Image (cartoon, coloured by chain):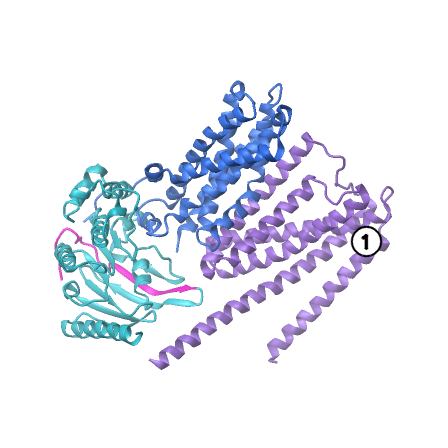
């Protein structure tokens, strides 16, 4: 696990701590009294079938979703105020979180402004380079393919150099080249000491970076391990069961 | 390591959201053109229904301008929040380290601006079609329009955030908004009627009612609006 | 029935009887004991219920406002239950008061409706709070429903004085042929206060029962979810 790098700082405590966090959407319970600590530098693979609570967990860690009861805390950043904590978080969600009617550059410049970055337009232009979208800076996002939108979404998530990265099935819709690129980007972030929580359905290169696997079922933790052997087993089992669910539903 | 950037104050964040709203709308002008066309249609329909004489227009024109504006507003305000749902761009803004009220305030200002643009078409059209000269009272009239429109924008934006989370939102927004805006309708129409009368006379009470309405609901929006953006 | 249920059912029966008796006394008082008014005669007696209904409606809406604000700050669902119970009951009394006013207007002035400030603002209030209930039906998630309707409820309540004032001022600019305010002769005060007392007691009873209903619904939903979860767990 990375202990040095730009995202490490001499503070103790978990980066994200769920304390009996519960989330109900009417009669549906998305998360049941979840207690979990994510330590600095971990790369957590969040697994489980649809509806098991992965998206809710990620959105709760992003402070987008308020727990119905219990709490989500950020002990490692206990000295920061709420806004500063938010600034440490980058997220790729189920939806692109991008404005179709604006250009790639305009999208990034807007978010750069909201994150208080200096020279937002220049930062936006610079962020397009690593994701390979510099040539499409002035094109409307509406004209982008799924893969391009994912890359732009990642650029948006990384704008303020987040220490905590939350990814909700980031590989969906990416072709093999896109997945390879994503894996490389995440490996670099890991090397820099960022904490990553990623939900995913597939196996493959992205998941192979994981240092910990947490499997959810109906909003509760089924398995949680960071030993390499168990990790593999859990990932394989979850991938297999999601395939089974597909074939069972045919 | 401290992340890049610094915390953005309420004013700056509001301005960023406001410019984004304008930039997005001016890309396609969809909302503005449909609202302006709608308002012009209302103007024509009114004349067919009532065939007002010049005297009638002086007496009823004020109410009619504000009704047209209220209808236009209640249709135009909904996309303010429902447009942000398909791609969860609202979530992206809530995720950002800004005061949630900045999102609402930025949209309020943008909606206010769009409504003023609609008025800039409505008033000349009304003046020409009904042969009522507005130029002699254009100063005070602009003041009344701004105060009343601001009230519509403030309450309308908050209610748009409310109805965006409910079913039947296109019908729900006018349903919630029109009764709530009764004070604005009465005060603005009263003040406008005073200005259109011969000789023009602006009863100050109406101005105080409008200012009071704007202050009360802007404060309420600041206190409670953030709760509407949670999940 | 368990001992608890029995005693609370007994308590409810006693309270209902007491309130019923009080309302009967108030009705009797208004119709028989109160002095007859000079100009309008027997018809004026509707005033006791028209005005007291509207006042009790306003009490209930104020209670709802408190429920809304406290819920937004504390997030305890009990305050949301209080709010919806108070709005429903308030709507009943407000509507009754408005209809009573209308009934009074017809024989007194020959029209069913007068656009005076009290009647009109009461009407706008009824519309706003009906919308509150409609809004609640259109949001499925109970937590979101509570938050959203609380914000709307707060706005609606803050609007009421503004509505009243703007109609009142408009009325003074455009005076109508009639004004509904009744000056109350001192002899009529006791019966009037009795009506208010009786209707307030009725309001409290109704809100309390409606609150309990909401609480039961909530508990039922929770139990059902728990049992589904346990079944699921058992199956897997």
In this picture, residue B37 sits left or right of residue A90: right
Front one among A95 and A6: A95
Give chain A's shade: cyan
- Does residue A56 appear anywhere in the picture? yes
Dot 1 crowding, Cα within 10 Å, few <14, some 14–19, many 20+:
many
Residue in the image at 82% along x and 58% along y: C28
Screen quadrant of the N terminus of chain A: bottom left
* Magenta-drawn stretch contains A13: yes
Screen quadrant of the C terminus of chain A: bottom left
Front one among C112 and A190: C112
In the image, the segment drawn in magenta is A1-25
Numbered label tally: 1
Give chain C's shade: purple
- What chain letter is assigned to the residue under label 1? C
Residue named by callout 1 = C30
Front one among A139 and A220: A139
Is residue C217 placed above or below B81 in the rendered structure?
below
Secondary structure category for the residue under label 1: helix
Q: Quadrant of residue C118?
A: top right
Label the blue chain with its letter: B
* Magenta-drawn stretch contains B192: no
Residue in the image at 76% along x and 60% along y: C23
Q: Quadrant of residue A48?
A: bottom left
Front one among C222 and B92: B92
Is residue A130 placed above or below B29 in the rendered structure?
below
In this picture, residue C26 sits left or right of residue A214: right
């Amino acid at each position: 696990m990375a202990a040095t790098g730009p995202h490490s700082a001499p503070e103790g405590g978990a980066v994200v701590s769920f304390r009996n966090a519960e989330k109900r959407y009417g009669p549906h319970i998305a998360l049941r009294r979840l207690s979990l600590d994510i330590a600095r530098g971990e790369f957590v693979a969040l697994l489980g079938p649809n509806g098991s609570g992965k998206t809710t967990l990620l959105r709760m860690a992003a402070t987008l979703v308020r727990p119905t009861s219990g709490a989500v805390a950020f002990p490692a950043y206990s000295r920061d105020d709420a806004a500063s904590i938010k600034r440490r978080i980058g997220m790729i969600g189920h939806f692109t979180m991008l404005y179709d009617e604006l250009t790639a550059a305009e999208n990034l410049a807007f978010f750069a402004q909201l994150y208080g970055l200096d020279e937002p337009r220049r930062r936006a232009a610079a962020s397009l380079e690593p994701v390979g979208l510099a040539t499409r800076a002035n094109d409307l996002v509406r004209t982008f393919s799924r893969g391009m939108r994912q890359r732009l979404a990642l650029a948006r998530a990384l704008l303020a150099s987040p220490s905590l990265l939350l990814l909700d099935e980031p590989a969906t819709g990416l072709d093999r080249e896109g997945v390879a690129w994503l894996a490389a980007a995440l490996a670099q972030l890991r090397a820099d000491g960022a904490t990553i929580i990623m939900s995913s359905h597939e196996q493959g290169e992205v998941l192979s970076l994981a240092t910990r696997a947490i499997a959810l079922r109906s909003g509760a933790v089924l398995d949680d391990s960071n030993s390499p052997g168990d990790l593999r087993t859990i990932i394989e089992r979850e991938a297999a069961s999601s395939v089974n669910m597909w074939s069972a539903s045919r | 390591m401290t992340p890049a950037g610094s915390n953005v104050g309420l004013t700056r964040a509001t301005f960023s959201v406001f410019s984004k709203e304008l930039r997005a709308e001016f890309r396609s002008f969809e909302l503005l053109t449909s609202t302006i066309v709608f308002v012009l249609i209302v103007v024509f329909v009114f004349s067919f229904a009532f065939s007002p004489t010049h005297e009638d227009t002086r007496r009823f024109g004020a109410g009619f301008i504000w009704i047209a504006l209220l209808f236009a507003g209640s249709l135009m305000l909904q996309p303010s929040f429902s447009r942000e749902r398909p791609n969860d761009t609202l979530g992206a803004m809530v995720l950002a380290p800004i005061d949630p009220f900045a999102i609402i305030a930025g949209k309020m200002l943008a909606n206010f601006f769009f409504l003023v643009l609609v008025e800039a078409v409505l008033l000349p059209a009304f003046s020409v079609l009904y042969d009522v000269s507005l130029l002699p009272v254009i100063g005070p009239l602009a003041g009344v329009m701004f105060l009343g429109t601001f009230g519509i924008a403030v309450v309308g934006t908050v209610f748009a955030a409310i109805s965006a989370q409910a079913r039947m939102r296109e019908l729900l927004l006018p349903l919630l908004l029109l009764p709530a805006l009764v004070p604005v309708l009465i005060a603005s129409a009263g003040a406008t009627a005073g200005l259109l009368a011969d000789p023009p006379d602006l009863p100050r009470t109406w101005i105080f009612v409008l200012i009071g309405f704007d202050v009360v609901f802007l404060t309420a929006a600041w206190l409670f609006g953030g709760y509407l953006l949670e999940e | 029935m368990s001992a608890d249920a029995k005693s609370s059912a007994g308590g409810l029966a006693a309270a209902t009887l007491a309130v019923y008796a009080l309302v009967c006394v108030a009705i009797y008082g208004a119709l028989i004991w109160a002095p007859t008014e000079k100009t309008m005669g027997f018809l004026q007696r509707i005033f006791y219920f028209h005005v007291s209904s509207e006042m009790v409606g306003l009490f209930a809406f104020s209670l709802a406002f408190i429920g809304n604000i406290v819920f937004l700050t504390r997030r305890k669902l009990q305050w949301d239950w209080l709010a919806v119970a108070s709005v429903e009951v308030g709507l009943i009394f407000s509507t009754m008061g408005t209809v009573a006013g209308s009934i009074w207007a017809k024989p007194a002035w020959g029209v069913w409706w007068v656009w005076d400030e009290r009647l009109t603002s009461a009407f706008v209030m009824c519309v706003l709070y009906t919308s509150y209930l409609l809004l609640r039906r259109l949001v499925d998630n109970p937590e979101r429903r509570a938050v959203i309707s609380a914000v709307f409820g707060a706005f609606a309540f803050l609007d009421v004085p503004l509505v009243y004032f703007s109609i009142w001022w408009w009325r003074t600019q455009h005076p109508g042929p009639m004004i509904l305010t009744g000056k109350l002769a001192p002899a009529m005060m006791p019966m009037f206060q009795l009506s208010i007392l009786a209707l307030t007691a009725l309001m409290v009873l109704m809100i309390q029962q409606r609150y309990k209903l909401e609480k039961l619904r909530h508990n039922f939903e929770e139990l059902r979810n728990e049992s589904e979860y346990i079944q699921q767990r058992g199956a897997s």
